[in-house]
């Protein structure tokens, strides 16, 4: 059984076997991995798996992991993303050995590109991006050589230096690797390795106007940092031959090896950075940290814990297999983590006032309630009870169906932690809507008093009216309607038409008075509603806003 406590190691997997053999055979002495995000968006749940794999595997073998930003595209990158990524990695409980940036190596990368030119392995091309795409060929047809492919070494060196000096406009020239335009692997058909971009960079400012392509820079970064095992998801598998070509042809002394694992895909969850950014830019969500977003910051704001997320990715395992994971599995682990941690209190999301007509006016008593029935160490609390209380509107029906055991005229129910009450009268407004119900209580039925005179079939929760704390409740459904995991270009409908219009419902009700000082990230189990987290963006003193983390129960079960 996987728990929220035993996720500080990886289960048996092929990468662990490779590392074990490499150490045994003396191929490597110290395991070095890296987590290499591009700072062009916020991290999401799929990145959580990549973070866990890189940091945990290195730690298992006494190695180290760098956090490295692959910041090679100044147009899409921002320091906001850099800061959010650092915060997310720390929050998940990992600490990097060194903080690195691809941009720190731009001079070295430029020099390595010069090595390729001198060897006749790279050339400056004047074709446009569209022309390069058109002459690249297909899976069944070879590409066509560029008319600029046979420029001399001297001419290429001169043009590349002038590209760096800023003599040319964006897109006017590129530097391409010279490999094989007939290669069955399209990634080896003279890929572009440098392009001109006149834009300020978050780390290097305006020092550069040419930038290396990710696929060229990435292997060089690994080699410069002495990475021994370059771990990435399987969509980069076709890039591995080019990765190895770059390392060999640029004559790097350190030779990292790339190994690919299956990426994490969640049903009803979009993880494309482009689409996540679209949700933010179009105002569908209120930011990258919206609790409906699958970003780590969104999950954190919603109320997920690092322990639950790491247990979840542990359960998904490490393999090359591509597949989708049921969203209910992630929800299972947050329930498992919170069931013994979260205080269990009462909240009324859709309030209906109840007046207990035979309870003394002006009197308030304190009742004893356990904070968590499964964890006695959390102790008890006292809650007020008086003549007026709030109950859930759905816990009363004037004309109920059969087997409805909550409150209705003439019926008796138990108030959680309190007394039996019986409904006698219903007060309606001029439109016939129920606005208040009048009940009587039986003082002999006080919870914990040992009363056994009779039983009732229904127990409902409540909040005392005079001291109730007004609260906002944000209830969530999956943001994406489709059952299938998100894939670029796979959907038939336009992406924004796949948004669930009921992904967010806002309700206004009340919580117990002891929760008036609840702080952001405080978590509670609300009787019959689910687990909730105090929102970090909209909560104010005396008026908390609660995000639904997850419902109380699910039919999901882990495989045995």
Image: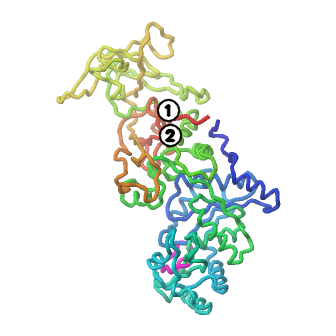
Q: Which residue is mark 1?
A: 555
- Residue at (49% x, 85% y) in the render: 126
Is residue 204 something one can see in this rendering? Answer: no
Specify few, some or many for label 1: CA neighbours under 10 Å numbering under 14, 14-19, or 20 or more: few
The quadrant where residue 232 appears: bottom right
SS type, badge 2: helix
> Marks 2 and 1, how far apart in space?
9 Å
Q: Which residues are magenta?
A: 194-206
Residue 144 part of the magenta-drawn span: no
SS type, badge 1: loop
- Label for residue 328? 2
Q: Position of residue 488 (x, y in %)?
A: 45, 59
Characterize the magenta stretch by its predominant secondary structure.
loop
Q: Position of residue 159 (x, y in %)?
A: 55, 89
- Residue at (44% x, 77% y) in the render: 130
Position of the C terminus, as image quadrant, is: top right
Depth order, front residue of 93/367: 93
User: As displayed, is residue 515 above or below residue 288?
Assistant: above
Depth order, front residue of 180/39: 180
Residues tagged 2 and 1 counted as in contact (Cβ below 8 A): yes
Depth order, front residue of 543/159: 159
Left or right of residue 109, residue 483 in this image: left
Residue that lies at the very extreme toward the top in this rendered image? 453
- Label for residue 216? none
Residue that lies at the very extreme toward the left in this rendered image? 430
- Residue at (34% x, 47% y) in the render: 501
Q: Earlier in the sequence, mark 2 or mark 1?
A: 2
């Amino acid at each position: 059984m996987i728990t929220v406590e035993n996720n500080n190691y990886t289960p048996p997997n092929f990468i662990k076997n490779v590392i074990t053999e490499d150490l045994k055979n003396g191929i490597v002495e110290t395991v070095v991995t890296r987590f290499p995000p591009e700072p062009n968006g916020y991290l999401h749940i799929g990145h959580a798996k990549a973070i866990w794999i890189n940091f945990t595997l290195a730690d298992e073998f006494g190695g180290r992991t760098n956090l490295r930003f692959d910041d090679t595209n100044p147009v899409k990158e921002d320091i906001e993303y850099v800061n959010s990524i650092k915060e997310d990695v720390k929050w998940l409980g990992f600490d990097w050995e060194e903080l690195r940036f691809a941009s720190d190596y731009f001079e070295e990368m430029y020099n390595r590109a010069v090595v390729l030119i001198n060897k006749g392995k790279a050339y400056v091309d004047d074709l446009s991006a569209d022309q390069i795409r058109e002459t690249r060929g297909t899976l069944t047809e070879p590409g066509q050589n560029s008319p600029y492919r046979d420029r001399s070494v001297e001419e290429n060196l001169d043009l590349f230096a002038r590209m760096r000096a800023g003599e040319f406009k964006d897109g006017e020239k590129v530097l391409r690797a010279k490999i094989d335009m007939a290669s069955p692997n399209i990634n080896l058909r003279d890929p572009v390795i440098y392009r001109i971009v006149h834009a300020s960079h978050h780390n290097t400012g305006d020092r550069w106007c040419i930038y290396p392509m990710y696929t060229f820079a990435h292997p060089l970064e690994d080699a410069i940092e002495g990475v021994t095992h370059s771990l990435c998801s399987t969509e980069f598998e076709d890039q591995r031959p080019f990765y190895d070509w770059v390392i060999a042809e640029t004559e790097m002394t350190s030779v990292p090896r790339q190994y690919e694992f299956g990426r994490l895909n969640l049903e009803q969850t979009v993880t494309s950075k482009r689409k996540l950014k679209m949700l933010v830019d179009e105002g569908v969500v209120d930011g990258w940290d919206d609790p409906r977003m699958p970003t780590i910051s969104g999950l954190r704001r919603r109320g997920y814990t690092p322990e639950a997320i790491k247990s979840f990715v542990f359960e998904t395992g490490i393999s090359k297999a591509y597949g989708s994971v049921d969203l209910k599995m992630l929800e299972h682990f947050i329930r498992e983590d919170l069931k013994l941690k979260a205080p269990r209190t009462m909240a009324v999301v859709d309030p209906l006032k109840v007046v207990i007509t035979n309870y003394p006016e002006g009197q308030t008593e304190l009742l004893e309630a356990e904070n968590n029935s499964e964890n006695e160490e959390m102790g008890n609390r006292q809650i007020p009870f008086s003549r007026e209380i709030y109950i859930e509107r759905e816990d009363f029906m004037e004309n109920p169906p059969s087997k409805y055991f909550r409150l209705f005229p003439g019926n008796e129910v138990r108030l959680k932690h309190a007394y039996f009450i019986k409904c006698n009268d219903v007060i309606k407004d001029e439109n016939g809507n129920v606005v208040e119900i009048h009940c009587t209580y039986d003082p002999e039925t006080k919870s914990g008093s040992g009363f056994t005179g009779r039983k009732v079939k229904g127990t409902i929760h409540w909040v005392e009216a005079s001291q109730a704390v007004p609260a906002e409740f944000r209830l969530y459904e999956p943001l994406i309607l489709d059952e299938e995991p998100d894939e670029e270009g796979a959907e038939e409908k336009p992406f924004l038409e796949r948004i669930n219009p009921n992904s967010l419902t806002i309700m206004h009700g009340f919580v117990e008075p002891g929760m008036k000082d609840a702080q952001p990230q405080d978590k509670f189990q609300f009787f019959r509603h689910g687990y909730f987290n105090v929102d970090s963006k909209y909560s104010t003193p005396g008026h908390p806003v609660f995000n639904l983390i997850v419902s109380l129960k699910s039919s999901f079960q882990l495989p045995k």
